Image (cartoon, rainbow, N blue to C red):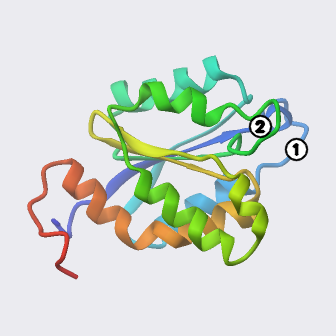
């Protein structure tokens, strides 16, 4: 990986109440702080949208197709509530799914709470952007990102044609 490159990142929070200004978003700012602390990513886009497929997909498509972000972290809409539609909205947008990212997050979360089995977040690639769905709670988002964060710069580098061997530390 080229060490001097800072990868761009977008943080997208899905929250009906947050989009209306009725609830403060705590998971989005937490993710921004956490991903920027790696030293490999800079959050250049952040927004809150209602948990509606059209708003989610419009934002994702704009960030990928127009802004060419390297990484998009979403928070919210990954559970089993009737309004949770993030995975169904994201999957058709992906060129490639990366199930290992979601599996790693769920496995790490299962060590903390049995409720983690209800998480349906997905991860994958659209064009050259890595997209990862995280839970909506600040604690859940933080714990899930922590489970995979060490591999994200390498993943983004590989997606963009990097040649470093995956077995290299």
Residue 51 is situated, as x and y percent measured from the top left of the image, at 73, 30
**Residue located beneath label 1 in the image:** 23
Residue 135 is situated, as x and y percent measured from the top left of the image, at 68, 53
Cβ atoms at labels 1 and 2 below 8 Å apart: yes
Tell me which numbered mark, 1 or 2, is placed earlier along the sequence.
Answer: 2
Please identify the quarter of the rendering in which residue 140 is found. Answer: bottom right
In the depicted structure, whether residue 122 falls above or below residue 167: above
Q: Quadrant of the C terminus?
A: bottom left
**Would residue 120 be visible to someone looking at this image?**
yes
Residue at x-position 17% and y-position 66%: 1
Q: Residue furthest top?
A: 54
Please identify the quarter of the rendering in which residue 112 is found. Answer: bottom right
Please identify the quarter of the rendering in which residue 150 is found. Answer: bottom left
Residue at x-position 15% and y-position 65%: 2
Residue 27 is situated, as x and y percent measured from the top left of the image, at 71, 56
**Would residue 40 be visible to someone looking at this image?**
no
Residue closer to the observer: 39 or 134? 134
The reply, left or right, for residue 53 in relation to residue 79 is left
**Residue located beneath label 2 in the image:** 15
The reply, left or right, for residue 85 in relation to residue 81 is left
Residue at x-position 36% and y-position 68%: 151
């Amino acid at each position: 990986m080229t060490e001097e490159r800072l990868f761009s990142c977008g943080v997208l929070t899905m929250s009906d109440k947050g989009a209306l200004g009725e609830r403060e978003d705590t998971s989005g700012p937490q993710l921004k702080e956490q991903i920027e602390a790696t030293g490999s990513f800079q959050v250049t886009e952040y927004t809150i949208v209602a948990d509606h497929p059209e708003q989610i997909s419009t934002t994702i498509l704009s960030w990928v197709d127009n802004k060419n972000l390297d990484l998009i972290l979403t928070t919210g809409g990954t559970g089993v509530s009737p309004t949770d539609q993030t995975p169904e909205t994201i999957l058709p947008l992906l060129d490639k799914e990366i199930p290992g990212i979601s599996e790693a997050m769920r496995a790490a979360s299962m060590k903390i709470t049995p409720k983690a089995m209800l998480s349906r977040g997905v991860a994958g690639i659209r064009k050259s952007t890595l997209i990862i769905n995280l839970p909506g709670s600040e604690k859940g988002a933080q714990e899930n990102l922590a489970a995979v964060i060490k591999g994200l710069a390498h993943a983004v580098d590989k997606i963009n044609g990097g040649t470093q061997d995956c077995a290299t530390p």
